Amino acid sequence: MLNNVETLTIILTVVIIAIVILIAILSLIYFRSKSKKDKAPKAKSADISVDNNKTQKEKSYAVESVMDFMEFDRVEDNMIIQKDGAKYIMVIECQGINYDLMSEIEKNSVEEGFVQFLNTIRYPIQIYVQTRTINLESSLQTYRDRVQEIEDNLFRQEARYKDMISSGNYSKEQINQAYYELTKQRNLNEYGKDIINSTERMSLNKNVLNQKYYIVVPYYPEDLGQNDYDNEEIKNIAFSELYTRCQSLTRTLAGCEVNGKILTSNELVDLLYVAYNRDEQETFGLDKALRAGYDELYSTAPDVLDKKMRALDRKIEEEGFNKANDKVIEAQSAKEKALRQKEENMEDLISQMAELIIEQNRTIIGSDIADDAINRVNEEKQQKKEQEKKEEGGTEINVKEKTKRRRTTKTA
């Protein structure tokens, strides 16, 4: 019996060990297969990211300064031509929207439209913002012309109303109707004059600014590759390509509720004129230049070197004036100092002059008298010096006594 029990226990232990080993092998196989499945999608995502990096590198463009579009050769057919026809530019003016005053639904639609706008871009663009001072001169001229018409009509109605009253051929209702029309015309005239006055006061404020937003769309004829087109054909191709791009951008901007329009040649010239002539744009506007017939002079700004020369001339003149003024003051002070010294030494000078006169007339007055007179002059001069010393010493003693008295009072 014991042998049978021992054999059974040995068999059970062997079976249990075999089962444990089998379970371990199956679990190992399961975990390995699971780890392979987890690694497979990571590799795929890595491949996708590599592909995305490649596409991004292919679509990347060199960053250019927005000020480059201002270097132009000429403006033709609503385009800015640069570098002897190596680059053509068309500009879209955009009307901004007040995003902060919109509701959440409107903001979401604007954002979705802007995302669509960005997704439609397949070529480089530039965004340019130009700040201008609002020029109300044209509005004022329009108001003045309109008010002048109203005032002329008012004079005619007043003359007609006086004729109606003086003639006596009109009824009371007709006269009242004419008076009503006359009053209405007077009120309209006064209202127009008030508008002109308020607009003129507003125009005095130079801080009234307006921002304009532009999208600059370039085209490079080198994208055509090797071609046998002449300059006129290349310009036509550039115009058609730029016009198509700008129309596409304008339509996509409408989804953001932003209105856009392509600038004409005159508007492009005005844009460049304001960019080049910030200080003179109000005084010498482009519309004034065109009315005066100067349609080829778009830049009124002086040369930079001329500005520096004038600034140096003004500085030299100011420094020269200041230096001359200082030297004149120094000369005057030196002269005043010499005068004070002469006044202080006047007694000595008088004595020296007296001695000189006596010496010159020694033969006439005699040697004894001359020597006696010279001695008297020297004695008098010596007495005055001693008296001045005594007076100075007295004043010093008095000052010392006063200071001592003040000290004693303070200590007391």
Image: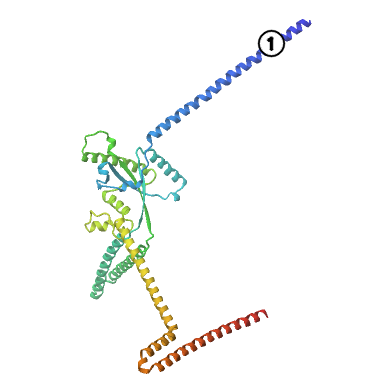
Instruction: Give the vertical position of 164 relative to 367 (above or below).
Output: above
Q: Residue 402 location in percent, x, y?
A: 60, 83
Circle 1 Cα neighbour tier, 10 Å, few/some/many (<14 / 14–19 / ≥20): few
Instruction: Give the vertical position of 270 relative to 358 (above or below).
Output: above
Query: Quadrant of residue 403 in the image?
Result: bottom right
Instruction: Give the vertical position of 171 relative to 79 (above or below).
Output: below
Question: Label 1, on which residue?
Answer: 14
Q: Nearer the viewer, residue 18 or 395?
A: 395
Quarter of the picture holding the C terminus: bottom right
Q: Residue 142 location in percent, x, y?
A: 29, 61
Is residue 282 visible to the viewer in this orientation of the structure?
no
Is residue 269 visible to the viewer in this orientation of the structure?
yes
Q: Residue 357 location in percent, x, y?
A: 37, 89
Locate residue 268 relative to residue 15 in the image: left or right. Answer: left
Locate residue 372 relative to residue 192 in the image: left or right. Answer: right
Image point (28%, 43%), residue name? 88
Query: Quadrant of residue 201 in the image?
Result: bottom left
Quarter of the picture holding the N terminus: top right
Locate residue 250 relative to residue 19 in the image: left or right. Answer: left
Q: Amino acid at mark 1?
A: Val
